[in-house]
Image (spheres, rainbow, N blue to C red):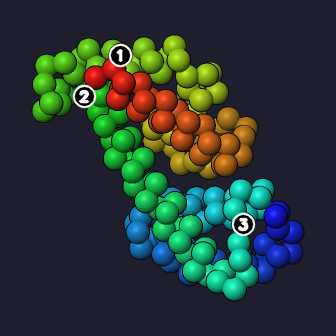
Amino acid sequence: MTMTKSELEILFKTHYAAMYRLAVSLLYDADEARDVVSDVFASLLDGGLAIRSDNAQGFLLTCVRNGCINVIRHKQMRERFIKLYSTKAEPLADGPDDSMMLAELRNYINNHLPPLSRRIFTLRYLQDMTCQQVADAVGVSRVTVHHHLSQSLEKINAYFTNNK
């Protein structure tokens, strides 16, 4: 069931502050916290999430917590990718195959990700732009940016998991 904008506005006014505080306390980053909370409301608006009115606050806070966990996981993966992808990266402690893995990662990103996903991935993870900055630069919504990043990371992760 898709929520109306007035129902969403009531939820936003009632629960935004608590959701934002939770996100900031988990992420220690105001911009990322706003992104996570915005994503929850965007999912409610487009019908991706259905909410029960008897426990709205608990549901919304759980969604924020889960969103924060995903951000933290992506950060960990991002740090690994940046270290591998950067031309100035020092060799990783994992071994001498780093340069081969770096070349393979670059090749995969350049040859297997669709152009929009490649651009979004590069702007977000390699130029360290916020999701909103990427959305503005590319001319898409923040939800679209998250969607492309999520798909790109899943594809890259699956590729490297299957080709170890």
Q: Using the image, determine if residue 20 lies above or below residue 144.
A: below
What residue is drawn where x is 47% and y is 21%?
109
Q: Using the image, determine if residue 80 lies above or below residue 102.
A: below
Spatial CA distance of label 2 from label 3 is 44 Å
Mark 2 vs 3, N-terminal side: 3
Q: For residue 158, what is the image quadrant?
A: top left
Q: Using the image, determine if residue 6 lies above or below residue 92.
A: below
Disc 3, SS? loop
Q: Which of the labelled discs sits on residue 104, or is there none?
A: 1
Q: Position of residue 41 (x, y in %)?
A: 69, 65
Q: Which of the labelled discs sits on residue 89, or is there none?
A: 2
Mark 2 vs 1, N-terminal side: 2
Hey, what amino acid is under mark 2? Ala
Hey, what amino acid is under mark 3? Ala
Mark 2 vs mark 3, foreground winner is 3
Give the residue number, with chain letter if any, for mark 3.
Answer: 50
Q: Position of residue 20 (x, y in %)?
A: 55, 73
Q: Is residue 16 left or right of residue 76?
A: right
Mark 3 vs mark 1, foreground winner is 3
Binning the other alpha carbons within 10 Å of mark 3 as few (below 14), some (14 to 19) or many (20 upward) gives some
The reply to whether dot 3 and dot 1 touch (C-beta < 8 Å) is: no
Q: For residue 25, what is the image quadrant?
A: bottom left
Mark 3 vs 1, N-terminal side: 3
Q: Is residue 111 left or right of residue 7?
A: left
Q: Using the image, determine if residue 113 lies above or below residue 62.
A: above
Question: Can you see residue 5?
Answer: yes
Spatial CA distance of label 2 from label 1 is 15 Å
Q: Position of residue 50 (x, y in %)?
A: 72, 66
Hey, what amino acid is under mark 1? Glu
